[in-house]
Image: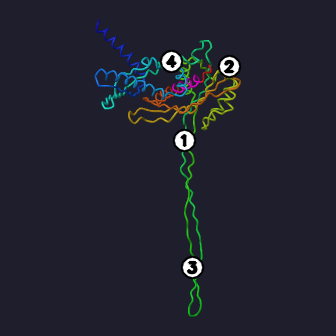
Amino acid sequence: MNYKKFIFILTFSTSILFSFYVNAVEFRGVGSETYTGTKTTKKINATLEIAKNKACKNAFDKYVQGMEESKRMIFENIQGPIYQNLNEYLTCETIVEENIDKKKKKVTVVMKANIDETRLDIEIKKNSKVFSTSSDDKSKLAMIFFSRTIDAQRTYDERVSKKTKTTTGVDINEEETDTGITSSTTETSSTETGGSKLKKADASVYKVDDNDTVKIEAAMKEIFTKARFEPMSGKRLVRKKWRELRQEIVESLESGGSIPEEARWDIEDILIDKRISYVVFAYFDVGVPEKDPATGSQMIAVALNYAEIMNLGGSNPVSLGTISGVQMKGKGVNNDIAKNNAIAATSKETGKRIVALINSKGLN
């Protein structure tokens, strides 16, 4: 009985510890402090503690510097209480390197800090205006998402253009002899060669996949709901005109273009009439399957090509900003699993950035 109880406690404790480190990010910081007078063990230990605290703060500062811009804007408004209680947001106990300079009377230390990113994200969300609104008055956010896959790609070789120039001339040679002047004519020719290379851009043909779009919406909806928005399907909100609008958008995306402005304007007008607060237009590109050389697993990359967040709360729609360049790779025993993993990872990261961008504007 005691043995089973011990195993339970050990497993439970390990789960908590593992859970923390899964949500933690590691940074290393450097701190230095000097002492005066004669070197003693007590004095060195006291100086070391000060240096360690400085190193831990330096590690946290590095983390803050790497924050996404819109997230950092909110953090800066609440950073005072966080810095005052820094130990609640990180674990910083491991000394990586320690140096005592007797000549300069200086102690320098490098510390490893594990920062609880989840807890910080919670604090940031709690201080956004959308979080502080009542549950009956959440901002409605419409999603207009598309996913496309490369269906075919035409590669063009370099076209070589050759040029030849031939010049013909006549040389006349005159020579005086005993009988008079004789002359001879010689025809000469010279050839110049050259040319240039012309490379035509490769052309890709895309295929819009509604099944992948549904998966993207599901992953993003989870992020938006946790951020206390009310996510809504854009196509349902504009369903009376969706068939016509979808055809126009798909034709553009499958030919390598983007979501046409005219279609966006029509969608925005309908959503304004329905009192929707925000609309997000976004399209994602699903890459070609490949094999991971290290494991042999299937691997697929999914990238956010473009996303724009529009505020529909005023008299005219206003862009809050654009996001692009989010790319994640997924792995799996087959292409479907690899693709689903990549879609989930890319969608969730995109959703976090969209939420941070909206919150940073402080409009809700």
Spatial CA distance of label 2 from label 4 is 29 Å
Q: Which mark is residue 186?
A: 3
Residue 306 on image: x %, y %: 58, 32
Mark 4 residue crowding within 10 angstroms, few (<14) / some (14–19) / many (20+): some
Residue that carries the numbered disc 4 in the rendered image: 123
Instruction: Tell me whether circle 3 and circle 1 mark residues in contact (CB < 8 Å).
Output: no
Q: Name the residue under label 2.
A: 275
Kind of residue sitting beneath label 4: Glu
- Which residue is the site of mark 1? 153
The crowding category of the residue bearing disc 1, from other C-alpha atoms within 10 Å (few below 14, some 14 to 19, many at least 20), is: few
* Residue 293 location, quadrant: top left
Under mark 2, the amino acid is: Arg
Is 178 in front, or is 119?
119
Q: Would residue 215 be visible to someone looking at this image?
A: no
N-terminal-most mark, 3 or 1? 1
Start-end of magenta stretch: 348-360
Which mark is first along the chain, 4 or 3?
Answer: 4
